[in-house]
Image (spheres, rainbow, N blue to C red):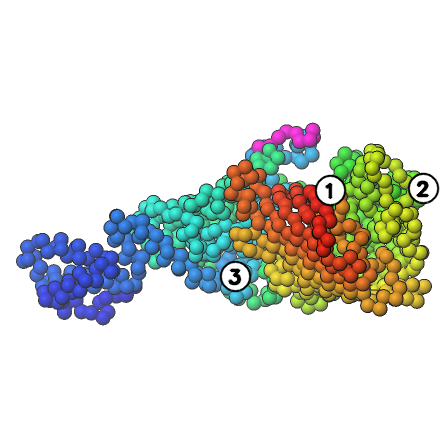
Amino acid sequence: MYNPASFISLSSFSRTGFKVLYILLVFAGDKLKLGIPFLMRELGRVKHQFFTNKVCRFMGGFLVCFVLLDINSNCFARTFSTPKDSVNWLNQFMADVIKLQKTRRKLSFTNDAYIKNHLMLDHGPKRIFGKSIKYYSGINNNQLVWLNESFSRLHYDKDIGYKERVNATKSYGKYPSWEFKSAAQLSLNFSQDLVRLESLSDKSFVSPLAQNAMRYYQYNLVSKNAKELTVEVVPKHRFSPTFSGYLTFNINNCALRYLDLKISGDKGINFIDTLQVVQDYGREDIVPFYTLLKYKGDVLKFYFSGSSQAVFSDNTGKPDFFKDFKPAEVVQDDNSASHSGVLKLHRKVPLTLQERLSYEHQDSLNIRRKERPIVDSLENLAPRLNILPLLFSEKIYTSLNKRRAIVLDPIVPAFFFNTVEGFGINYGVSFFKFNQNNTSWSVSPRLRYSFDNKELNSDLSASWYYKPKKRGTLNFSIGSTYMDLNPNGSLTTLQNTLNTLFFEQNFMKLYRKEYVSTGIGRELVGNLYLSVGTELARNYSVTNTKDFVFRDIKERNFSSNNPISPSEEDKLFPVYNSFYFNSSLIYTLKQPYITKDGVKIYKLPQGPRFVLSFKKGISGVLNSQSDYTYGEVEIQQEKLDMGLWGYGSYSVSAGKFYNARSIYYPEWRHFSGNLALIFNPGLRSFHLLNFYTYSTNRYFYEGHFEHNFNQFFSNRVPLLRKLKLQELLGGAYLYQPEKGNYFEMYVGLKRVVFRADYAVAFDKRGVLNQGFKISYNF
């Protein structure tokens, strides 16, 4: 703030000088909005003798100071507006605040950060699906089910983004909440136009300080004094993606001091009924020194409440620690050497009694486990094997030190029926070993037995994760089994079984394969990943042997196992040997990742991914009869952010066979089609494409696009709003020389793990097919 005494002598003011200054201020007063003319007119009513030279010099200096304050701060000047202009004044004040946010976006900072995530089960049903909740989960009402703390150092720069080093972390419980795993996620920046709550929702919300905030919000003056101004934020539309609450500013420089905003459940966040965001800027820094998120909600009548807190303080460590980061590395989480001691030293939010007791109970259990003489065995396989949970879901058993694990496949989905093998079972078990250097290996034996044909097949696969920092993986497989002619997969085994037995539709076509294969992959440099592999196989074409159904539909009959001649039971290809070499090169633009204890964890790419694939069938090697060369290129990107309009995903690819002197049907290029009611919602999947008809041994062009409007329209419809449905719009294209062009268009609605679409397929002759499709993901 300027000091008027530094450039003007108050003693120079005389009675005449004061009058001249008064006249100037009268003309400038309206523009400066200081109210000085009004003040001088009131003083003029007093006797003229009152205005001695001494008083004039004092009043002149006083008025000059006010002129300089106006030059230095427009916000302070407006505090003297008349009441009738309060609405316009407030809107102008907020307009200046919003303009100020442009500069705040570009500012850098480095802070220490303490984070605490807390989840409580307030109330829940005693039984679900007839099973006791307490027996299977061990949780009760008003119980702490998850607690997580971390201490880290955080840096932000507009050019490199967020860089965070996590120095310590500790957690309690086995049911993680919608936690914010890093300080960067809790650094909610309301100076940005859109605010994302990453751990809670994919939706974007308009900030009350956004450049276009006047379109979405109304501002009401709550209180005002010489230092602070409090404003109520009211959305102009109740169901728009907006906040409601209060903002407090420094009236002199328009800086944000305090923020208390809320989002209700009708804004479209799944399972959340209310969400409160509190930020305290204290010293008016660009980063709040305290951030709090509190939420309440319910899932299947389980009512919960939780909070995420972050306390930011001045950096006490190496100020330029972020210079050790790789360009795409956003978080370094190496907490193996520091836990409770570091957290205790930097804990900014005290533990509650319940939290402290929960930690003590967990720590005592860990100590008891370490004191046991044998700590690397599968002791907790339990005296009795609980079969019921294994019927429909996999069961995981781990050793006491979490270094070894056994995973048992679910029993019911392992049973199958198809028209080639009849009734059978395909069951597997996986063994895992995790080493202290973060490498790991796994072995998975699997048996496949046909009860009708009395045929046993088996295979064994092994994998070694040998280079965690480079995603280095080595794979090996050997065995014999029945496989889908379409390697992209047509239906799951369970879906094919149900369609075959109850709807008399044997969509899946099979062949038998005896094989040995190996592959290796690793990151070369940056985001460039290379994988190579080989396979030697003997392939057998098979035919239908069973026609059993539970529900016989008169107008339907099973098709043959030959997709080219579905009405005739001819073998699709002769028995042949194949040997091939394949490789793929993947490069991803703007691929952020987290390094946790030396292992890379990749986040959603912010740019497109380029994939170059190559495959070579080599004849003469171990009697191989395959002889061809194949190349393919693809560009894809998922969840391309489009602000309030949701996000889009796309994939464009093309491939061609070269010198295809000898190529058999299993080696053709196949596509992810669908003919059943239930479909695969993957980006490169079609809704109505025949599983095998469009397969080609020449060349193809393929494209997919899908946009998720993320409740942009449904939130405006009263009956749909409460369902929180996401609107989908998409299309697909395929060209291959024998069939020509194929198009699909679809619209759909999605709710968490369920989805329903209506699709239309057509070619140059018109509509080919149309209908409803559904999918689920659990």
Q: Quadrant of the C terminus?
A: top right
Across and down, in percent, residue 240 comes to 48, 46
Front-most of residues 758 and 124: 758
Question: In which quadrant will I find the N terminus?
Answer: bottom left
Answer with left or right where residue 223 lies relative to residue 604.
Answer: left
Residue beneath the point at 50% across and 64% down? 158
Residue 495 percent coordinates (x, y): 78, 42
Answer left or right for 88 relative to 462. Answer: left
Give the residue displayed 56% in from the left and 52% down from the top.
646
514 left or right of 467 in image: right
Residue at image mark 1: 677
Q: Is residue 736 visible?
A: yes
The residue at the point 49 percent across, 59 percent down is 111
Part of the protein shown in magenta? 123-131
- Queried whether the magenta region covers residue 568, the answer comes back as no
Q: Residue extending furthest bottom?
A: 7
Circle 2 is placed at which residue position? 454
Q: Which residue is mark 3?
A: 155
> Does label 2 or label 1 sit earlier along the sequence?
2
Tell me which amino acid carries mark 2: Lys
